[in-house]
Image (cartoon, grey):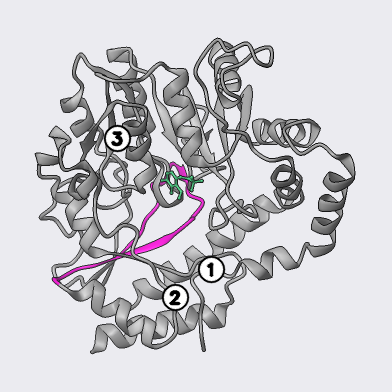
């Protein structure tokens, strides 16, 4: 049985009538730039994320860029971010004219090694940019303590984690800015590109809104050099149809993750790390689990409300991850390697000074990680297919 990595049609077509209505409403309104649809959607996201301001933007990527621009980050500045992340995190720092400074990551929660970040703060550091990867919040107490001590703003890259919680607090609103992506594969997946920038700071929100539309207020009077970073009303209207189902989508992802963990942990050679001690592990030589472990399961910290944008296995041993991917592909099971090359090894960042540092955990994660299907509508039968294939791999 084929198991896709993601099946957007099941979720979207279940709402087809309502989506058609939303399209019709925008069509008849004649309002195709900003306006009430965007404002209403922003208000709903602000409520969901527990923040004062939500600013609809053209993509998650543009949300990060806008946050950096609003904070005045530019040439000569440094921004600390993990190397093991999607390109946009670091790419935006460079696009703002600043220099990314890469940190290592935790082998178990996949997020920024905050002790490494602390070592890399310099007088030029203008922001810390942690990522809540795969749906799990980074160690935000440690991030925020570092930021307070050094008086540096934090931009949370919550592209994959809208609605995730850290010690009961929503991601996105803990830092100076937070960004959610609405890219189709995200938990609230749009119908094209889109994103949301959030903040509790009134002045920064005002500046970000201005920068979103060429830095002008009123129109044609440009206080700043901004860009065109607006969320489309059509996108906002369509996403407003999906938003009431968001909690249900998350619960289904959580149930799927729990099922995988229960079943896969029972297989010989699979280690389940509980992360009960609530701290990151950044010893690249550690496997954490029995010495015979061949696969390590993803684990949420007890205090985190993980939203499982991805269920990511670590497959230990040279070449073994690629062998598992090949076997799953042969069985028509969709997988993806997020991310095969850490940022400090990317060609475009070869001249970035911090790219010269070894980041052993980031490098190890890039060679071991494999994400398997976790989308909300995945059936138990499909999950059994994945679990059976992993069991065969472990036997082979
Ligand atoms: C960690 C991370 N940061 C930033 C982005 C950029 O978001 P978008 O694709 O909406 O531009 C993504 C999206 O894939 C992401 O996963």
Q: Is residue 327 left or right of residue 2?
A: left
**Vertical placement of residue 392 versus 102, above or below:** below
* Lower sequence index among marks 2 and 3: 3
Q: Quick one: 37 or 328, which is closer to the camera?
A: 37
Residue range (magenta): 297-318
Tally of numbered tags: 3
Count residues near mark 2 (Cα–Cα under 10 Å), then give few for <14, some for 14-19, many for 20+. some
**Answer yes or no: do the residues labelled 2 and 3 have beta carbons within 8 Å?**
no
> Which residue is labeled 3 in the image?
81
Q: Position of residue 239 (x, y in %)?
A: 70, 48
Q: Quick one: 219 or 231, which is closer to the camera?
A: 219
* Lower sequence index among marks 1 and 2: 1
> Which residue is labeled 1 in the image?
6
Q: Quick one: 94 or 313, which is closer to the camera?
A: 94
Whether residue 117 is visible? yes
Q: Is residue 315 magenta?
A: yes
Count residues near mark 3 (Cα–Cα under 10 Å), then give few for <14, some for 14-19, many for 20+. many
Report the magenta stretch's main SS.
loop
């Amino acid at each position: 049985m084929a198991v896709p990595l993601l099946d957007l049609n099941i979720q979207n077509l279940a709402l087809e009538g309502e989506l058609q209505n939303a399209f019709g409403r925008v069509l008849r309104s004649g309002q195709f730039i900003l306006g009430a649809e965007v404002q209403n959607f922003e208000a709903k996201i602000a409520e969901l994320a527990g923040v004062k301001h939500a600013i609809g933007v053209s993509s998650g990527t543009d949300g990060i860029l806008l946050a950096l621009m609003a904070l005045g980050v530019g040439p000569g500045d440094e921004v600390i971010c993990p190397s093991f992340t999607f390109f946009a995190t670091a790419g935006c720092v460079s696009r703002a004219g600043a220099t990314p400074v890469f940190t290592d990551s935790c082998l178990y929660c996949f997020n920024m090694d905050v002790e490494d970040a602390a070592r890399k703060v310099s007088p030029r550091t203008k922001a810390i940019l942690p990522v809540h990867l795969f749906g799990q919040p980074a160690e935000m107490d440690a991030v925020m303590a570092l930021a307070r001590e050094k008086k540096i703003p934090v931009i949370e890259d919550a592209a994959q984690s809208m609605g995730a919680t850290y010690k009961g607090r929503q991601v996105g609103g803990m830092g100076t800015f937070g960004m959610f992506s609405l890219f189709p594969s995200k938990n609230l997946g749009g119908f094209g590109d889109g994103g949301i920038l959030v903040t509790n700071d009134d002045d920064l929100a005002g500046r970000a809104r201005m920068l979103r539309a060429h830095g002008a207020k009123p129109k044609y009077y440009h206080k700043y050099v901004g860009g065109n970073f607006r969320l489309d009303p059509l996108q906002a209207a369509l996403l407003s149809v999906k938003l009431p189902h968001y909690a249900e989508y998350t619960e289904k992802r959580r149930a799927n993750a729990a099922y995988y963990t229960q079943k896969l942990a029972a297989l010989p050679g699979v280690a389940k790390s509980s992360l009960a001690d609530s701290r990151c592990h950044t010893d690249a030589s550690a496997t954490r689990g029995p010495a015979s472990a061949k696969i390590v399961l993803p684990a949420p910290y007890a205090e985190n409300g993980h939203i499982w944008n991805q269920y990511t296995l670590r497959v230990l041993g040279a070449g073994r991850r690629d062998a598992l991917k090949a076997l799953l592909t042969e069985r028509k099971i969709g997988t993806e390697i997020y991310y095969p090359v850490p940022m400090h090894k990317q060609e475009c960042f070869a001249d970035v000074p911090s790219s010269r540092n070894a980041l052993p955990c980031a490098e190890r994660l890039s060679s071991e990680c494999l994400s398997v299907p976790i989308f909300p509508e995945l059936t138990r039968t499909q999950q059994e297919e994945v679990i059976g294939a992993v069991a065969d791999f472990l036997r082979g």
